[in-house]
Amino acid sequence: MKAVIIYFTGTGNTKFLANLLKAQLENQNHFIVDLFSIDSSSTLIDLKPYDYIIFSYPIYAFNAPIIFDKYVKKLYLPKNKTYIIAKQSGEPLSLNDSSSYYLIKRIKKSKNVLFNEYHFLLPYNIHFRYEDDFIKELLRYDNKLLDIMSYEIKNNISRKVKYNPLYALNTFIFKIQRLGGPINSYFYKVDYSKCIHCNRCLNNCPTKSIKLINEKYKFKNSCIMCMRCSFNCPTNAIHIGFLESWKVNGVYNYEKIISDDSLKGEFLKQHKSTFYNFFPKKIEKINELHKEYFGK
Ligand SMILES: Cc1cc2nc3c(=O)[nH]c(=O)nc-3n(C[C@H](O)[C@H](O)[C@H](O)COP(=O)(O)O)c2cc1C
C-alpha cells in the first residue's frame, strides 16, 4: 500500500509528527510512505497513485492554518481512497475538534468518507514553553495513539466524526483571528542590536511575507502567524507585536527529550492547575483504547 502525508508545519512540530507517522506506517503496516510539505509555492500533488491520504496540521485558534485550508481547497481528491486526518495541538480541548470540519466537508464533497481522525498532542509554539518532562509525557500519549491508528488501519476500524454545531460556531468566530496575522505583522520589529543578519527568517517564511529592503527586514501582510520566524531566530531578535508576551523562542529538542532517561514523563501528577486538568481525561481515553486493542 502507498500512503502520502500532506502536512503544513509552522515551527516543526507537525513535521516531527509526520515523520513519526511515516515510521509507524512503514514499520507496522508495511506501507510505502511519501511526505509532502505545504508552503505558498507548493504545486498541487497528484493523489491518484496513493491508497491512503493523510492530512496533518497544527491547530491555530480552533482552526486549521489558512495556508493548509487554501491548499486543500484546490486539491483534487480522487474517489475510493482512504482519507485520514492526523491533527496536533498544544492542548486537548474538545473545542479543537471542529478545526477539521472544513476538511471533512471537502472530503465528503468529493464523494469520499473520512476513515478516522486522530488528535496528537505536542508542545505550544506560542503562549508559553512546555517543560521537557511534560513533553515526554505527551510523547507517551502520542505513541499510544500511533499504535491505535496502525491497528485501526490494519483492522479497518472506522469511526464517524461527531458534528457539534456549537464547536463549529466557535471555529467560525475564531476565524477572525486569521486577520490577526496581516494586522499584527505591521507591529513586527527586529532588534538590530541582537540581529546577526543570518536571513533565516527571510528564507524560511512559508508565505514569503518577509522582505529585506535597504538592509532592514520588512514584515508584509501575508503573515499567517505560524511563528516560524520568531521561534527560529537564533538571537531572539524578532518582536512579534501584540503577541510579544506570548512568544516562544527556540526549537524543542525531541531527540534529547526522548533519549534523556532522567525525564520520567510524570509531569501531570505534580501539576494540577486548571490548564493541566484538561489533559488526564484525554490521556485516559487513549490508555483505555490501547488496553482494549493491545491488552496494555
Ligand atoms: C497562532 C497560533 C494559534 C494557536 N492556537 C492553538 C489552539 O487554539 N489550540 C491549541 O491547542 N494550540 C494552539 N496553538 C499551538 C500549536 O497548535 C502547537 O504549538 C503546534 O504544535 C504547532 O505546530 P507546528 O510546530 O507544526 O507549527 C496555536 C499556535 C499558533 C501559532
Image (cartoon, grey):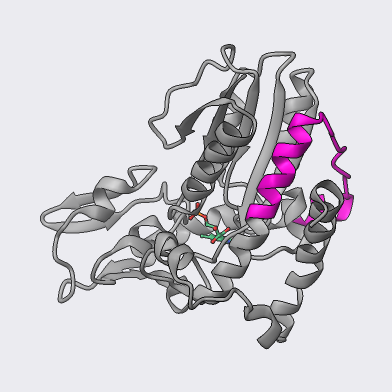
Q: Where is residue 215 shown, x and y percent of the image?
A: 11, 57
Where is 37 relative to 82, above or below?
below
Residue plotted at (49% across, 54% down): 13
Q: Quadrant of ligand 1?
A: bottom right
Residue plotted at (42% across, 75% down): 244
55 in the magenta segment: no
Q: Where is residue 248 shown, x and y percent of the image?
A: 43, 71
Range shown magenta: 143-170
Q: Nearer the viewer, residue 101 or 181?
A: 101
Residue plotted at (18% across, 68% down): 195
Q: What count of labels does the image hold?
A: 0
Q: Main secondary structure of the magenta part?
A: helix
Left or right? Give the position of 241 relative to 126.
Answer: left
Q: Where is residue 278 shown, x and y percent of the image?
A: 76, 72
Residue plotted at (54% across, 66% down): 124
State which quadrant residue 77 falls in.
top right
Q: Is residue 158 visible?
A: yes
Q: Is residue 105 visible?
A: no
